[in-house]
Amino acid sequence: MKAVFTQKAPKPVGPYSQAVVAGNFIFLSGQIGIDPHTGKLVEDFEGQVRQVFKNIMAVLESAGVGKESIVRMVVYLKDLSLFKEFNSIYEEFFSEVKVKPARTTVEVSQLPLGALVELEATAFID
């Protein structure tokens, strides 16, 4: 096993890794919409979702893979009424990926720093 770290994604705020490579899998920790350059949470929902995807891409790229390697996503939404808006951005992000990841989406009562969305991903190293 080995930890993955990149300066291009937010630093962990606790005792965990941005991602861990175990065998042929990369397990990414949950990402919220923190801009790694400012250390602050992006304010609006769309901006947070887009920042989360940027953060995920930065971690994946530092592990040597891209979004086409994602096999599973878990989506945590503060408000499930944002599901349609989230899906639109999600579909755009994965538009060029032939096999879309398996996915679970749940509504949660709170997320770190008052975030509106958190995503975690599992990727496969082929």
Image (cartoon, helix red, strand yellow):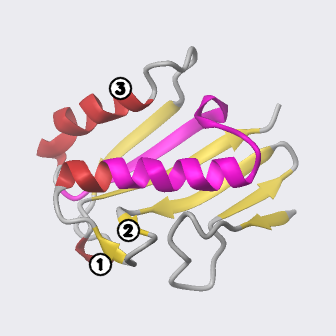
Disc marking residue 113: 1
**88 sits to left or right of 10:** left
Callout 3 secondary element: helix
Residue displayed at 35% across by 26% down: 91
Q: How many marks?
A: 3
Callout 1 secondary element: helix
**What percent of the width, then of the height, locates residue 122?**
63, 45
Classify 87 as above or below 111.
above
Magenta range is: 50-78
Front tag of 2 and 3: 2
Q: Nearer the viewer, residue 74 or 18?
A: 18
User: Which quadrant is the C terminus positioned in?
Assistant: top right
Q: Earlier in the sequence, mark 1 or mark 3?
A: 3
Residue displayed at 25% across by 29% down: 88
Q: Earlier in the sequence, mark 2 or mark 1?
A: 2
Query: Where, by quadrant of the figure, is residue 93 drawn?
Result: top left
Q: Are marks 1 and 3 in contact (CB under 8 Å)?
A: no
Q: Earlier in the sequence, mark 2 or mark 3?
A: 2
Q: Residues within 10 Å of mark 3 (few under 14, many from 20)?
A: few
Q: Which residue is mark 3?
A: 91
Q: Which residue is mark 2?
A: 34
